[in-house]
């Protein structure tokens, strides 16, 4: 009896164990079914980019994203080149649609990601199952650096200031929050210049004066901009064009930009190779770095440091969160205005305006300056890249004179500032 009872208990335990194993196997099977995710195949989806739809093909295999390819797009190559190249493989590698966007080309980056997210839904998957996890924020690493001059922003102004400072003996660091140099300047056709060597060769130098150009500019802007600033800009413009050519840029003197400006002053110098605008800026930056200069991309300046009204440094944050604490004697802010900051534009102007920008022109320079009291009591509105009233998209065929009012891309300051500039 005792032996028989013992066997019965062991049998009972065995049956319970087998039942548990069956339940566990069934559970794992269900989990496996859930993990399959999107159905295998290739799907097409699109999302609105900066300059129209961005069409993407996404291939799934075994529930994973194995291929992402942009098949159609009309984005500006100089700006969208990096996200078009880097975002698709990053999505495949992470098996996630919400990878980090490319600073300076967030609209294109977000369009690619939105298309992939749509394709996941088309394939019967859940976008939440294809999301990159957020890493826990720890204490940011801090790197201490030193320089004579730090330049913030790598558009025309920033790259020019950087190389010029270095050529004059200053140890210089260049910071750019985007992933590439050039800024809004690579969208433009070229710079203006008065009395450049190109103008002299064309025989137009001396047919008008700096004072004439300056007076017409001030009248056009209702004398609301800084007269001294613009007089100096016009005075040095020809020499600046010459200097840029000496350092690797190539321009063709065009005179007037378009028929509408036929009666204007012939000052327009266009990039000789309109397909190589980025390359020209890259040439200047390489000249700077090869001579020992330091360039930090995807690094945004966010705090100026000053003592007794004297700049002592600047702090900047890199894409991975690392903080650069840079001690320096001077900071040159070339951040390009705030056209990409709709809230700031609305606050300063009073209404929404259409804009063209790379997305990085959000007023960083103004914010940092105001934080340490620079320019207190003055209104400085730098409307870089603003074009027309809301609802009228330039180039769409709707930008008729009767429907649009173009805002001069200039710096507005106290009217009294204009009185200090020469008028003859």
Image (cartoon, helix red, strand yellow):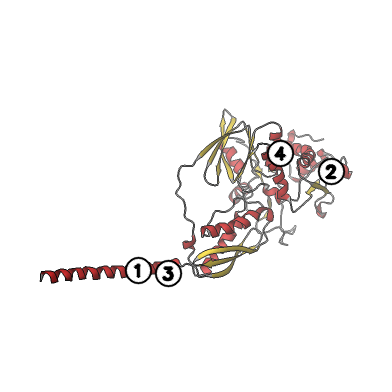
Disc marking residue 352: none
> Which quadrant holds residue 388?
bottom right
The answer to whether the residue labelled 2 contacts the one labelled 3, judged by CB atoms less than 8 Å apart, is no
N-terminal of the two: label 1 or label 2?
1
Residue 121, given in percent of the width and then of the height, sits at 51, 67
- Residue linked to disc 4: 226
Q: Secondary structure at mark 2?
A: helix
- Residue linked to disc 1: 25
Q: Nearer the viewer, mark 4 or mark 1?
A: 1
Report, in whole angstroms, how far the alpha carbon at label 1 lies from the one at label 2: 80 Å
N-terminal of the two: label 2 or label 3?
3
The answer to whether the residue labelled 2 contacts the one labelled 4, judged by CB atoms less than 8 Å apart, is no
Badge 3 crowding class, 10 Å Cα cut-off, few under 14, some 14 to 19, many 20 or more, is: few
Using the image, determine if residue 385 lies above or below residue 160: below
Q: Residue at x 49, y 59 (%)?
A: 131
Using the image, determine if residue 286 lies above or below residue 121: above
Q: Residue at x 29, y 68 (%)?
A: 20
Q: Is residue 371 left or right of residue 233?
A: left
Report, in whole angstroms, how far the alpha carbon at label 3 lies from the one at label 1: 12 Å
N-terminal of the two: label 4 or label 1?
1
Along the line of sight, which residue is nearer the eye, 200 or 266?
Answer: 200
Report, in whole angstroms, how far the alpha carbon at label 2 lies from the one at label 3: 70 Å
Q: Does any portion of residue 407 appear in the rendered image?
A: no
The answer to whether the residue labelled 1 contacts the one labelled 2, judged by CB atoms less than 8 Å apart, is no
- Residue linked to disc 2: 198
Report, in whole angstroms, how far the alpha carbon at label 2 lies from the one at label 4: 28 Å
């Amino acid at each position: 009896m005792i032996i028989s009872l013992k066997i019965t208990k062991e049998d009972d335990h065995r049956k319970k164990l087998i039942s548990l194993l069956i339940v566990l196997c069934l559970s794992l099977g269900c989990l496996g079914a859930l993990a399959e995710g999107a159905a295998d195949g290739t799907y097409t989806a699109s999302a609105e980019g900066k300059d129209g739809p961005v069409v993407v093909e996404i291939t799934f295999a075994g529930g994973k994203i194995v291929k992402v390819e942009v098949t159609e797009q009309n984005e500006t190559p100089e700006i969208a080149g990096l996200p078009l190249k880097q975002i698709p493989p990053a999505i495949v590698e992470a098996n996630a649609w919400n990878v980090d966007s490319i600073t300076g080309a967030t609209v294109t980056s977000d369009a690619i990601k939105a298309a992939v997210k749509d394709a996941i839904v088309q394939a019967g998957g859940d976008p939440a199952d294809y999301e990159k996890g957020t890493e826990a924020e720890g204490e940011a690493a801090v790197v201490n650096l030193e320089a004579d001059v730090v330049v913030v922003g790598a558009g025309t102004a920033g790259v020019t200031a950087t190389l010029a400072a270095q050529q004059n003996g200053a140890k210089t660091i260049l910071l750019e929050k985007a992933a590439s140099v050039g800024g809004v300047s690579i969208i433009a056709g070229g710079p203006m210049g008065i009395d450049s060597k190109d103008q002299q060769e064309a025989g137009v130098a001396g047919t008008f004066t700096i004072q004439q150009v300056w007076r017409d500019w001030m009248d056009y802007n209702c004398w609301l901009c800084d007269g001294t600033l613009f007089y100096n800009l016009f005075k040095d413009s020809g020499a600046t064009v010459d200097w840029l050519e000496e350092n690797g840029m190539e321009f063709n003197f065009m005179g007037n930009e378009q028929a509408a400006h036929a009666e204007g002053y012939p000052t327009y110098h266009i990039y000789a190779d309109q397909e190589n605008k980025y390359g020209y800026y890259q040439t200047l930056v390489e000249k700077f770095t090869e001579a020992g200069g330091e360039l930090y991309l995807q690094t945004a300046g966010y705090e100026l440091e000053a003592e007794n009204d004297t700049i002592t440094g600047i702090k900047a944050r890199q894409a991975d969160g690392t903080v650069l604490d840079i001690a320096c004697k001077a900071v040159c802010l070339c951040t390009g205005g705030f056209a990409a900051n709709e809230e700031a534009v609305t606050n300063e102007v009073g209404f929404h305006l259409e804009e063209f920008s790379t997305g990085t022109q959000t007023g960083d320079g103004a914010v940092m300056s105001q934080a340490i009291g620079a320019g207190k009591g003055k209104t400085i509105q730098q409307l870089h890249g603003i074009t027309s009233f809301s609802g009228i998209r330039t180039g769409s065929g709707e930008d008729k004179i009767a429907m649009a009012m173009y805002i001069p891309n200039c710096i507005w300051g106290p009217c009294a500032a204009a009185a200090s500039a020469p008028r003859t």
